[in-house]
Amino acid sequence: MTFFSPLLAKLHLMWIGLIQSLPLLGIGLLVLVITWLMTKLVANFVEKTLAYSPIRTALKSLFKTLFKIAIWTLGVIVAATIIFPSLTPAKMLTALGLGSVAVGFAFRDIFENFLAGILIMLRAPMRIGDFIDCNGVQGQIEKITIRDSYIRRTDHELVLVPNAHLFKNPVRIQTNQPLHRYEVVVGVGYGTNLAQCKQLLKETVTKLEDVSSEYPVEVYTQAMADSSINIQIRWWAGSKPLDYYQSKDAVLSAVKCALDEQGIEIPYPYRTLTFAQDLTIKNHSTT
């Protein structure tokens, strides 16, 4: 027994210490339970307060999460100082400060996307449901989380884009306005009466249902190309990708029919060949 005496004495002291610290453990657990109840109450209060607010849903969820984190952090610090009397709040904050620096270096990308996600949620122009284009990533915003943004392409593929990518790069918001201006170029022959042709194209496009009547249709002579005179047609339609495809299909189809009815040529490319010397053309007859 002499060999185990120091070990038994140590275990006895640990047991006595555990018995003596049971009240502190109980109080610490009570503090954690109260903290849990407080997070529930605060989360419900924040949710009810922001229920009729115009703030985005993702931002409301972020506020709830931040309040929960703040309450849990305070509760854990209080419980730890009660269970371990030698551990003061100042020491806890110092440890948290040193730990946050280490964690910040280790998870720099995660925190970068987290902060970018908050700033994106605070952006007024970009909303859930908008169609965007950012460095080749095109589609509709389905959801914005703390780290990623969910972009649904027009072919229904889902692309998860880190928030830092959207925050650092230029983002073109296609549906920021209900209407967009589109354009197409049509080539007509050099023998065409341009004034009559442009008036015909303008009247034809203006009558289309897929073209908005809020803004006038514009028709301009763009260039004198190799084999045609190019005429640019501008019109306004919905800003969604489907609106663009439908209106463009309607415009091109109507323009083709109108030019055909008036006998206006849409020329193929012509090439004029010039030879330095006269060529002799020989006819070969076969019998």
Image (tube, helix red, strand yellow):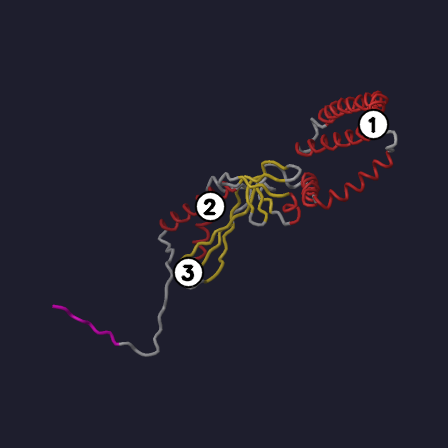
| First of labels 1, 3 by sequence position | 1
Q: Which residue is mark 3?
A: 228
Quadrant location of the C terminus? bottom left
Residue type, mark 2 in image: Lys
Q: Quadrant of residue 128?
A: top right
**Magenta stretch prevailing secondary structure:** loop
| First of labels 2, 3 by sequence position | 3
Q: Circle 1 sits in a helix, a strand or a loop, which is it? A: loop
> Do residues under tags 1 and 3 come within 8 Å of each other at their CB atoms?
no
Q: Residue furthest left?
A: 287
Residue bounds of the magenta highlight? 280-287
Toward the viewer: 244 or 199?
A: 244
- The answer to if 233 sits in the magenta stretch is no
In the image, is residue 4 above or below residue 278? above
Q: Circle 3 sits in a helix, a strand or a loop, which is it? A: loop
Q: Which mark is residue 2?
A: 1
Residue type, mark 3 in image: Ser
Q: Quadrant of residue 177?
A: top right
Q: Which mark is residue 239?
A: none
In the image, is residue 231 above or below residue 113? below
Q: Position of residue 258 (x, y in %)?
A: 39, 48
Q: CA distance from mark 1 to mark 3?
A: 111 Å
| First of labels 2, 1 by sequence position | 1
Indicate left or right for 245 with 93 as reference.
Answer: left
Residue type, mark 1 in image: Thr
Q: Residue furthest bottom?
A: 277
Q: Position of residue 99 (x, y in %)?
A: 77, 41
Q: Position of residue 55 (x, y in %)?
A: 69, 33
Q: Which residue is mark 2?
A: 248
Measuring 70% from the left and 33% from the top, which residue is drawn there?
A: 62
